[in-house]
Amino acid sequence: MDSGNGTALEVFTSVCDDFYATARAAAASGRKVAGFVCSYAPQELLHAAGYLPVRVLGRPGGTPRADQLLQAYACSLARSSFDAALSGEFDFMDLVVFSHTCDTMQNLADLWRSSRPNQKVVIVSAPTVTSGPAALSYYRKVLADVREQIEALSGPISDEAIRASIDLYARHRNLVQRLYDLRREHSELISGRELLAVVTSSMMMDKEEHLRLLEPFVAELESAGDVKAKRLPRVFVAGSVCQNMGFVTALEEAGCMVVDDDLCMGGRSFSLPEPPAGDPMDALVEMYLGRRPCPAFHTPGFDPGAFLVERARAARAAGVVFLLTKFCDPWFFDYPHVNKSLEAAGIPGLLVEVEQNLPVPEQFRTRAEAFVELLKAKAE
């Protein structure tokens, strides 16, 4: 990126160098901080209550404290984030919101509650089947209960405050989606690694502040003149959490361009539909159940394989790289079907198991280079 975009991009990147520096500073200044473990948590409710919502991620290194309480087959996101909590690194958070996406996260919520008694734990249980009157009615009651739990800590949350937060988050999502559009259309303007820095930082910063920086950043990209396109294979990345952006960096260093993604820490977090008018709680229900589902949920009529083929083709991707967190059962249940859909469409795929708390292994770099060579040979 040129120096004109450097200021905003440097801020986004620096936030990713120390995920929680901004949140710790906010807590030190007196602002309440709420951690959320999954993007299915209703961040707008937290924001409307005056909290700074930040994504709960793991940290690099071993997990000796968590390993005493969690099974060895628990995913590295659960182990590394819980280890950070047990070591006191998340003590600046006033509450932590869990979404019941899998058994591991449900168990983690219970362990977190018992191990960190001074930190309020709130569980959001979205229905496994996300459409239909029963799902809407059930989730409406769940969010009403979540609202009451938050109000017990923060005081009353007005409908007007919730609507204002909904509108703010919608503006931000639309801008991020525009950035993704630009990445697909003009991949030479911003690298995949830079895009993930923008996205990840948005989950750690005050939303108004991030939006203030993001608006001129995107506007400058939109007004950029023609840039000579790189003749490199275009790659789509799919998977669950990928907090270590080194994997995307390693892919691009192998000689390809990451032009789009369907990551839990990426595009999928911004896939909510436009908020409907009317009651703001009803709007939250429709938005969160109407989003593109992650593999932990089921939306009748949604085919994850067909969806990924469509997205890869829309991005003109030559191949798809799956960055799947080891022991993430929902994703590994989906993968065989999704991969068969890609094979039927003639789109090569590469499956890589990722440990969130470990550095990028050299083996991954070797496999990435081999995959890129395959894509180049296929294009000849």
Image (tube, rainbow, N blue to C red):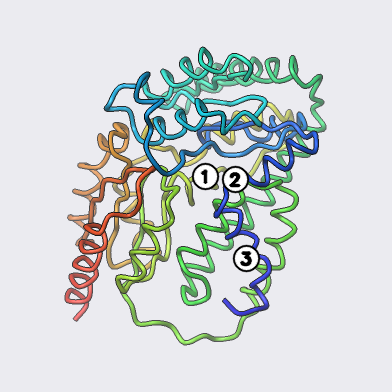
Q: Mark 2 points at which residue?
A: 203
Tell me whether the residue at label 1 lies in contact with that at label 2, contact meaning CB atoms closer than 8 angstroms: yes
Q: Mark 1 points at which residue?
A: 269
Q: Name the residue under label 3.
A: 10
Crowding at mark 3 (Cα within 10 Å: few <14, some 14-19, many 20+): some
| Image quadrant occupied by the N terminus | bottom right
Placement of 361 over or under 179, stated as above or below: above
Q: In which quarter of the image is residue 299?
A: top left
User: Looking at the picture, which amino acid does disc 1 mark?
Assistant: Ser
Q: Looking at this view, is 52 or 261 the one in front?
A: 52
Crowding at mark 2 (Cα within 10 Å: few <14, some 14-19, many 20+): many
Residue positioned 67% across, 65% down in the render = 8
User: Looking at the picture, which amino acid does disc 2 mark?
Assistant: Met
Placement of 320 over or under 219, stated as above or below: above
Placement of 265 over or under 301, stated as above or below: below
Q: Where is residue 35 in the image (x, y as percent from the top left)?
A: 60, 32
Measure the alpha-carbon separation of dots 2 and 3.
16 Å
Crowding at mark 1 (Cα within 10 Å: few <14, some 14-19, many 20+): many
Q: Which of marks 1 and 2 is nearer the N terminus?
A: 2
Q: What element carries label 2?
A: loop
